[in-house]
Image (tube, grey):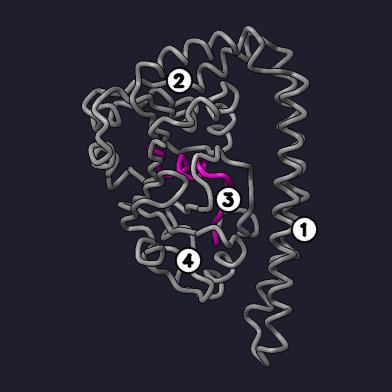
């Protein structure tokens, strides 16, 4: 299996080129920057960083063009997105209560023999809610695909064909961050969730979140909202059993053991990993091959070096 490399944010600490060299990639690299939306083409710095070897797949622009050419598909897509937004609101309401209960029990002092079974049950309830939400998301997406067959529609199919030719000349693909929902939707619209399997992948920031099997939004002190980490979508599943948290140092209260423990225990057995500037995780043959500068959140509320934890 080709490697899947997850990287921390690249804005201030650029490690993508080093990761590409370490993987022995010397050819062209297809770039997905659809998460940047209208700024998708502003990839000059990225192209220079990789010595001009990139080719932008322009998934955001292709999506806009396909929707413009197929109004029926566009309307159906908008309807699905509205349904997903309403479902997410319902999930958030239930999540607030479930998380508050789990957090209160984790922070409560007293007889461990009495408390621990209650804590475990509260966490199981939280996990059950997350899994229920994932099942609903899968069903909505499946219903949409079965009814509208986006890949078979001419407005989409011609881009799929063109992307196939372009990717055929690429040795690897890089996935940048940005708006993760838009990024994921564009990747799926053109069937890249399947096409990319088997290719070396370098995904950073929000791109790393999308590459895994479960897309989790997180922020302890957001400008709006309650700050509860929430499952937004199923990811591409290019690597599994890991929940990467880019910008964790900026977005999470990592010095708070209770918050750290709750995140780690909620998504266990997946490894919840702070992926800050300079962090790198290499996944190969369905397993962790290497990790640098990435810290795993533990059930005890600490952060430990991921490589040492998995050694």
Where disc 2 sits, the SS reads loop
Q: Which residue is under mark 1?
A: 94
Measured in 3D between alpha carbons, the distance from the residue under mark 1 to the one under mark 3, in whole angstroms, is 16 Å
In the displayed structure image, the side of residue 274 where residue 17 appears, left or right: left
**Camera-nearest residue between 197 and 207:** 197
**Residue 247 appears at what percent x and percent y?**
42, 53
Binning the other alpha carbons within 10 Å of mark 4 as few (below 14), some (14 to 19) or many (20 upward) gives many
**Residue 184 appears at what percent x and percent y?**
56, 33
Q: Earlier in the sequence, mark 1 or mark 2?
A: 2
Disc number at residue 216? 3
Q: Earlier in the sequence, mark 3 or mark 2?
A: 2
Measured in 3D between alpha carbons, the distance from the residue under mark 3 to the one under mark 2, in whole angstroms, is 25 Å
Q: Which residue is under mark 4?
A: 297
The magenta span reads 201-220
Q: Which residue is under mark 2?
A: 58
Where disc 1 sits, the SS reads helix
Magenta stretch contains residue 166: no
Q: Earlier in the sequence, mark 1 or mark 3?
A: 1
């Amino acid at each position: 299996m080709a490697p899947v490399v997850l990287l921390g944010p690249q804005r201030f600490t650029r490690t993508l080129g080093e990761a590409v060299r370490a993987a022995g990639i010397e050819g062209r690299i297809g770039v997905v920057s659809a998460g940047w939306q209208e700024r998708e083409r502003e990839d000059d710095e990225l192209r220079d960083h990789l010595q001009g070897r990139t080719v932008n797949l322009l998934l955001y622009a292709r999506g806009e063009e396909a929707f413009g050419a197929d109004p029926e598909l566009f309307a159906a897509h908008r309807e699905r997105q509205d349904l997903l937004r309403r479902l997410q609101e319902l999930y958030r309401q239930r999540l607030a209560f479930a998380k508050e209960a789990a957090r209160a029990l984790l922070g409560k002092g007293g007889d461990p023999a009495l408390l621990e079974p209650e804590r475990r049950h509260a966490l199981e309830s939280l996990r059950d809610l997350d899994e229920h939400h994932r099942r609903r998301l899968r069903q909505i997406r499946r219903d949409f695909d079965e009814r509208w067959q986006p890949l078979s529609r001419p407005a989409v199919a011609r881009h799929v064909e063109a992307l196939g030719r372009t990717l055929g000349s690429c040795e690897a693909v890089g996935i940048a961050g940005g708006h993760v929902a838009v990024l994921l939707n564009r990747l799926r619209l053109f069937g890249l969730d399947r096409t990319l399997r088997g290719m070396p992948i370098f995904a950073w920031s929000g791109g790393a979140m999308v590459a895994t099997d479960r897309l989790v939004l997180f922020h302890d002190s957001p400008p709006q909202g309650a700050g509860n980490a929430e499952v937004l979508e199923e990811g591409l599943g290019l690597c599994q059993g890991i929940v990467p948290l880019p910008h964790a140092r900026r977005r999470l209260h990592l010095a708070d053991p209770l918050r750290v423990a709750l995140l780690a225990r909620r998504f266990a057995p997946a490894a919840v990993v702070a992926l800050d500037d300079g962090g790198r995780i290499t996944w190969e043959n369905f397993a962790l091959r290497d990790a640098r500068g990435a810290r795993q959140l533990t059930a005890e509320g600490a952060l430990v070096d991921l490589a040492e934890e998995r050694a």
